[in-house]
Image (cartoon, rainbow, N blue to C red):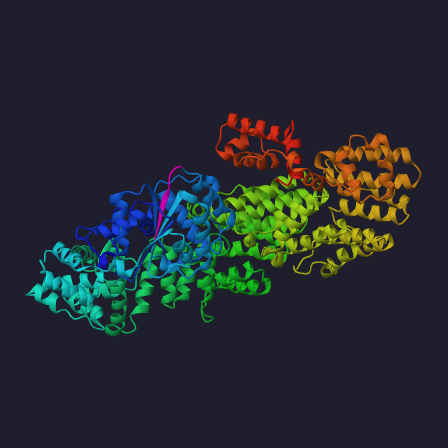
């Protein structure tokens, strides 16, 4: 008959195995089983039932007040309908971790959340759009879901978690009822809920036992109690459930139970004295020893307890303690938990009885947990033991090095290893230090730690040695990326492939983030060096990595860099498609904006500038600027400055455009090896700003000082030719254009600029007919992609040509903009009565995927719809947007600000 102190915890033995088979997580998601000694108090049940009609129910009181089993009994007996249960832990104070577990709890209890809601990808934050999708889905349900958060006081001080809960609760409408079990008040606007009559508040006074309830509790333990004794006991314990429970246990061993209960005098150390005197010391020495040693654990297993005691009798002892109600409770899958109050007192007593033993117990626990595959539970014990070499060795041995860079545990692990003492030595600890520094792009410190680790790598064939060699090779790829060396990255990638052979076959499969990180680092180094074909191939493989929280950031980054490659090749359609996939990956995984790479937003900004959609471009640049990558990733930093300059030019502020490039005047010196194409782009942006400022000679001088462009310098040569034409050197410009490398498939953005520059040159030489034909060709190439900016930058000669009927006819997409009526501005000035009928949420989902160039079948698969349903949505979209085909619908939606 299992029962816990204060009726506050129950048997979790019915916990089911969760994905990954984590019994600890299973216990957190399982509603405690109510034991036979539980006393159901109808007055409290009625309050909970009333809470089912209010958004928020707060069950608050001290430890041992009976909070948890009160709610558990109500959930199991009275059945509020669909519900989810989550026991909160301290690490859930990270918003991403908290919401990941909440979503897991919903699904665990059969609440069928749609995949489109996504899940957090980083522990420190949760994207607001994920919470909005969750709230909207709950609001649209026909019936409510009750979410129970037990032990919420463990995260009660986290404002971000409270803010997220408040947002979801307010916007979920009648679809969500929240029950919070906590020792302290949560950081929610409780006064508003109280004022609106939307809060059911069950406090410590409500939870306190009354005399008749005390008598019922004692009776459940087989001890009849007179009304007078029940009243006295209730007064002296002030109705505290834990105190009543302690007294009842003691009375069972007393010669005169009623006299004992009547004369019970709670004092300052009553609980501690009782637990030590009546629970600990009444047991045999072996049981006492087990309880003291396992008090360092949050949960224990018989085999783990045996490791701590050095004996093999833990299983019968734990089972006996559980049967005897000695504050040991099962939580499922042969795991047990000591009552927190009991464990805390035992730990103090452990220090008195066995001074200096606790660190060794932590060390033993860390080794056992690590061997059991419970690395997250093992590392804190190694840290508490002060054995950082053990912590680092186990971390590397489990191939967990990638978890410092990506996944929900990244911040927690980084914080744990930040405590590692400088005196800790060995290759594993140096690898951890190298990973932390290189993740921050500190190549000097990171490389120093990596070299020291390399010098001390073990030469044996053991598991840890193989994992160290593999991790070392993996970090060499990252170091090469941070240093900007594609050659070193490719060499290190070969070493990674060789080191893989020494690892167990299935070990890498359990760590998909490692291969994804290696490929993204390699592809990024190749991109920096201008090896675009190799980078595209490498990054494309990275994008195919298994989906999940551990790879979300990596896939997002790889897609963003693929988008940049397409942009550099002048293919705005493909660039935009990759960028939107990168954004969708981040949205779906709940990756907060500051944790994103910013590259996708930069590509979208570049595409928007070329389309002269300047407000959209500004918004994308602002989103890119707040990412952490803007300060540490050289490509992101350079592109951000270049695009800010281009946007300022487009807005007519050429002086500010030049100032925006001041920090890049000497080229990006953040990496050891320069990037030729990055230098070319800085020169192009600087020259464009000078041209916009009316100083073509300064623009020409930029290219003369810069020297010959890199191997992918076609666009740079075209920009130089344009500057030469503006400076009166048309023949020199034509010579440059004639010497361009033969591009078999030039992207439309590059092709348009080549043709327009040639048209300007021949027009300056008096060949207006040839110029007109070339402009017509440029218009034909630009129109499908709405590339307005090259024409807007063309100057008076181009405006003159476009006024000719042969060129301007049918080109309203451009001529309206040339006349000062940009498409976006025009659409927003339309009378309200001419605005299209609003799209439904699902129609908007379909429209977004049309913009990503998905086929009907791909849209159906991505949204889990039938093809016929997608076709129905398409017809409705075309009707509402007055369009006849996909491209027209997407363009119209952009003009209206829908995308």
- Residue 504 lies in the magenta stretch: no
Q: Position of residue 854 (x, y in %)?
A: 58, 33
- Residue 143 lies in the magenta stretch: yes
**Residue 230 versus residue 758 in the image, above or below:** below
Q: Position of residue 506 (x, y in %)?
A: 41, 45
Query: From where the camera sits, is residue 462 visible?
Result: no
Q: Main secondary structure of the magenta part?
A: strand
Q: Which residue sits furthest right?
A: 766
Query: From where the camera sits, is residue 273 visible?
Result: yes
Q: Position of residue 871 (x, y in %)?
A: 55, 26
Q: Nearer the viewer, residue 501 or 579?
A: 579
Residue 748 located left or right of residue 13: right
Residue 553 located left or right of residue 393: right
**Residue 239 versus residue 675 in the image, above or below:** below
The image quarter in which residue 540 lies? top right
Q: Which residues are magenta?
A: 142-149
Residue 226 located left or right of residue 861: left
Which part of the image, by quadrant, shows the C terminus? top right
The residue positioned 21% from the left and 65% from the top of the image is 238
Q: Nearer the viewer, residue 741 or 349?
A: 349
Q: Nearer the viewer, residue 695 or 672?
A: 695
The image quarter in which residue 322 lies? bottom left
Q: Nearer the viewer, residue 839 or 656?
A: 839
Q: Position of residue 292 (x, y in %)?
A: 24, 66
Q: Which residue sits furthest top?
A: 868
Residue 135 located left or right of residue 698: left
The image quarter in which residue 91 lies? bottom left
User: What is the number of callouts on the image?
Assistant: 0
């Amino acid at each position: 008959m299992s029962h816990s102190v204060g009726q506050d915890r129950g048997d979790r033995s019915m916990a089911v195995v969760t994905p990954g088979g984590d019994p600890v997580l299973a216990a957190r998601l399982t509603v405690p089983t109510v034991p036979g000694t539980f006393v159901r108090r109808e007055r409290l049940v009625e309050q909970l039932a009333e809470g089912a009609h209010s958004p928020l129910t707060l069950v608050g009181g001290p430890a041992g007040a009976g909070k948890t089993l009160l709610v558990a009994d109500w959930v199991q007996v009275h059945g509020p309908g669909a519900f989810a249960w989550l026991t909160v832990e301290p690490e859930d104070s990270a918003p991403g971790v908290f919401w990941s577990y909440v979503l897991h709890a919903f699904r665990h209890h059969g609440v069928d959340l749609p995949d489109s809601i996504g899940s957090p990808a980083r522990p420190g934050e949760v994207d607001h759009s994920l919470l909005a999708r969750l709230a909207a889905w709950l609001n649209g349900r026909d019936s409510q879901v009750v979410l129970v958060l037990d032990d919420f006081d463990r995260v009660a001080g986290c404002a971000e978690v409270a803010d997220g809960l408040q947002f979801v609760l307010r916007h979920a409408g009648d679809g969500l009822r929240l029950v919070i079990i906590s020792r302290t008040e949560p950081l929610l606007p409780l006064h508003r809920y109280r004022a609106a009559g939307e809060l059911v508040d069950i406090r410590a006074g409500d939870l306190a036992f009354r005399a008749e309830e005390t008598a019922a509790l004692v009776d459940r333990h087989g001890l009849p109690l007179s009304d007078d004794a029940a009243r006295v006991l209730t007064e002296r314990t002030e109705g505290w459930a834990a105190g009543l429970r302690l007294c009842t246990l003691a009375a069972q061993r007393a010669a005169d139970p009623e006299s004992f209960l009547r004369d019970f005098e709670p004092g300052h150390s009553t609980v501690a004295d009782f637990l030590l005197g009546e629970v600990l010391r009444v047991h045999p020495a072996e049981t006492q020893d087990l309880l003291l040693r396992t008090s360092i654990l949050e949960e224990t297993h018989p085999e783990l307890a045996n490791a701590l005691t050095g004996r093999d009798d833990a299983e019968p002892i734990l089972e006996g303690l559980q049967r005897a109600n000695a504050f040991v409770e099962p939580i499922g899958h042969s795991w047990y938990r000591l009552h927190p109050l009991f464990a805390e007192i035992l730990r103090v007593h452990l220090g008195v009885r066995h001074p200096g033993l606790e660190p060794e117990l932590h060390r033993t626990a860390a080794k056992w947990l690590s061997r059991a595959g419970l690395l997250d539970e093992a590392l804190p014990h190694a840290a508490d033991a002060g054995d950082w070499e053990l912590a680092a060795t186990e971390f590397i041995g489990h191939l967990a090095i990638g978890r410092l860079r990506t996944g929900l545990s990244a911040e927690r692990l980084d914080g744990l290893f930040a405590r590692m003492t400088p005196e800790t030595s060995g290759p594993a600890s140096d690898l951890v230090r190298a990973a932390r520094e290189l993740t921050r792009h500190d190549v000097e410190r990171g490389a120093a730690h990596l070299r020291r680790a390399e010098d001390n790598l073990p030469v044996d064939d053991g598991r840890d040695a193989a994992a160290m060699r593999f991790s070392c090779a993996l970090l060499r790829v990252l170091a090469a990326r941070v240093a900007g060396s594609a050659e070193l990255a490719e060499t290190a990638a070969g070493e990674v492939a060789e080191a893989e052979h020494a690892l167990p076959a299935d070990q890498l499969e359990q760590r998909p983030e490692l291969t994804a990180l290696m490929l993204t680092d390699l592809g990024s180094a190749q991109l920096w060096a201008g090896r675009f074909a190799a980078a595209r191939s490498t990054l494309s493989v990275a994008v195919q990595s298994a989906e999940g929280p551990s790879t979300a950031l990596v896939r997002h980054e790889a897609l963003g860099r693929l988008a940049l490659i397409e942009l550099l090749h002048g293919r705005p359609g493909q660039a935009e498609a990759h960028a939107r996939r990168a954004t969708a990956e981040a949205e779906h995984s709940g990756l907060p904006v500051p944790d994103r790479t910013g590259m996708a937003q930069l590509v979208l900004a570049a595409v928007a500038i070329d389309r002269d959609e300047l407000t959209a471009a500004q918004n994308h640049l602002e989103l890119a600027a707040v990412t952490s990558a803007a300060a540490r990733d050289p490509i992101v930093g350079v592109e951000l400055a270049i695009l800010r300059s281009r946007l300022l030019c487009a807005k007519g502020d050429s002086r500010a455009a030049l100032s925006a490039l001041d920090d890049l005047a000497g080229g990006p010196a953040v990496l050891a090896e320069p990037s030729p194409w990055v230098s070319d782009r800085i020169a192009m942006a600087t020259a464009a700003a000078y041209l916009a400022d009316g100083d073509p000679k300064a623009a020409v001088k930029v290219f003369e000082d810069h020297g010959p462009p890199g191997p992918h310098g076609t666009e740079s040569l075209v920009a130089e030719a344009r500057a030469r034409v503006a400076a009166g050197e048309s023949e020199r410009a034509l010579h440059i254009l004639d010497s361009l490398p033969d591009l078999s498939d030039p992207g439309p953005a590059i092709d348009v600029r080549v043709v327009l520059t040639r048209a300007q040159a021949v027009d300056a030489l008096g060949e207006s007919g040839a110029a007109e034909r070339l402009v017509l060709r440029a218009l034909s190439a630009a129109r499908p992609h709405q590339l307005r900016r090259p024409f807007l930058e063309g100057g008076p000669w181009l405006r003159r040509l476009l006024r000719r009927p042969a060129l301007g006819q049918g080109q309203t997409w451009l001529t309206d903009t040339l006349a000062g009526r940009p498409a976006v501005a025009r659409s927003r000035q339309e009378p309200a009565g001419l605005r299209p009928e609003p799209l439904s949420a699902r129609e908007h989902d379909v429209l977004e995927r049309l913009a990503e160039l998905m086929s009907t079948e791909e849209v159906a698969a991505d949204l889990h719809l039938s093809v016929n349903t997608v076709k129905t949505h398409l017809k409705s979209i075309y009707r509402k947007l007055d369009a006849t085909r996909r491209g027209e619908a997407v363009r119209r939606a952009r003009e209206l600000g829908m995308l």
